[in-house]
Image (tube, grey):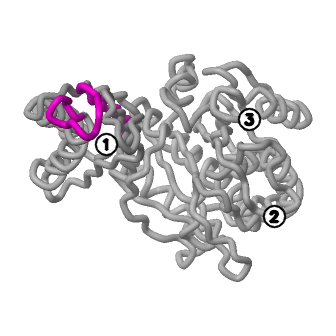
Amino acid sequence: MDTPDLKSRIRLLSTELFAEVVRHRRYLHQNPELSFEEEQTAAYVAGRLDEMGIPYQKGIGGHGLVAHIRGRNPDRALVALRADMDALPIQEENEVEYRSKRPGMMHACGHDAHTASLLGVAGILTRLTDAFEGTVRLIFQPAEERLPGGASLMIRDGVLQNPVPSAVVGQHVMPLIPAGKVGFRSGKYMASADELKLVFRGRGGHAAQPHQNIDPIMACAQTLVALQQVVSRHAHPATPTVLSFGRVQADGTYNVIPSEVEVLGTFRTLDESWRYRAHELIKQIAEGTAAALGAQCEVHINVGYPCLNNQPELTSRLKGAACSYLGEEHVVDLDLWMAAEDFAYYGQHANACFYRLGTRNEEKGITAAVHTPRFDIDETALTTGAGLMSWLALQELAFAVENTEAS
């Protein structure tokens, strides 16, 4: 249901509330908290909800909060919107007035913008309760950046129950897309992500007498090369697959062969069946290669987030609604993204769509990637973030109400 008057009201409110949303974002950016430690962040969100008179529950899945904004006939339909709240263990290098006040912590993935935008949505929708039927559930989620993921814990605590929402919608900043634009992709979008730990054990000793030792470094080196066969020779060529190793630690020195080497890495793919078959191949190749050299390899796989799938019909409707609100020229199609997101868990329990909010501004020098010390956003994107999400929520509520009437 495309209502021009409602669209105009949302645009006007998103402009009026822009300075307030920026204040939220800057406070959160200056006061980041790591996964599972978001106590002050949750208190800040609760304070803003109190000011708006929005009822909420706290302590869901850790420091998560769940709030509800009820329109006319609130039991007719329910749509959920999600924002994550945690920061990363990164030292910020930006010289801006709102830079992080906490050494070694930074909102380098834009979760401050997500939370601020959802608070902006709350401000908009509380002023529009006369204009929609149904209820909007706001999910302020902790711990997206660390396993097992705050989404899984909030779901465990019932965030998708009583009742189940007809749709769960999330947005995430994207520094590759200019501010003012958004991106959508239907179906498979983001990868599963599993943490790998390989421990090679041999027999250390003097480096001048390698024949008396079992060298775990050589076993490690040959195993890492052999493991690339998992991607190049076992994965279907049409199935995106990544196997990368980011840390190799061996406590030997110039003339000492160590007894142990530890390796950390990640395995990612977009096919859940292949994912678990690859786990077995990784174990077989690592254990077998090490054994052939007289060493041992213990393989530990910490199963992480699943593949993220955007429900096609929901995504198509939301993309169309975004084109209506922003103009088709401001809505782009996304490529597959091999990063992972615990938002994927919501899609296992309800129709879900995860889209991207453009934050790039080359003229301002805002181009750094997420998870880097110089990541920042063009804050004009917050108008889009709050306004569009409000519009999408109300359009999806209207669809749910109409669908209920038709049935």
Q: Are marks 2 and 3 in contact (CB under 8 Å)?
A: no
Q: Residue drawn 56% across and 70% down?
A: 177
- Residue matched to label 2: 95
Q: In the visual, does 276 lie left or right of 192?
A: left
Which dot marks residue 146? none
Q: Secondary structure at mark 2?
A: loop
Q: Earlier in the sequence, mark 2 or mark 3?
A: 3
Tag on residue 267?
1
- The residue at the point 18 percent across, 35 percent down is 286
Would residue 135 be seen by someone viewing this image from the given angle?
no
Residue 290 location (% of width, % of height): 16, 33
Amino acid type at image mark 1: Phe
Q: Is residue 199 magenta?
A: yes
The residues colored magenta run: 192-215
> Is 158 located above or below residue 71 in the figure?
above
Tell me if residue 267 comes above or below residue 164 in the rendering: below
User: Percent from the top left, x then y, of residue 8?
Assistant: 75, 65
Q: What amino acid is at disc 3?
A: Ile
From the viewer's perspective, is 229 left or right of 174?
left
Crowd tier of the residue under label 1, counting other residues whose Cα lies within 10 Å: few below 14, some 14–19, many 20 or above: many
Left or right: 247 in relation to 37? left
In the picture of the structure, the residue carrying the numbered disc 3 is 69
Q: Nearer the viewer, mark 1 or mark 3?
A: 1
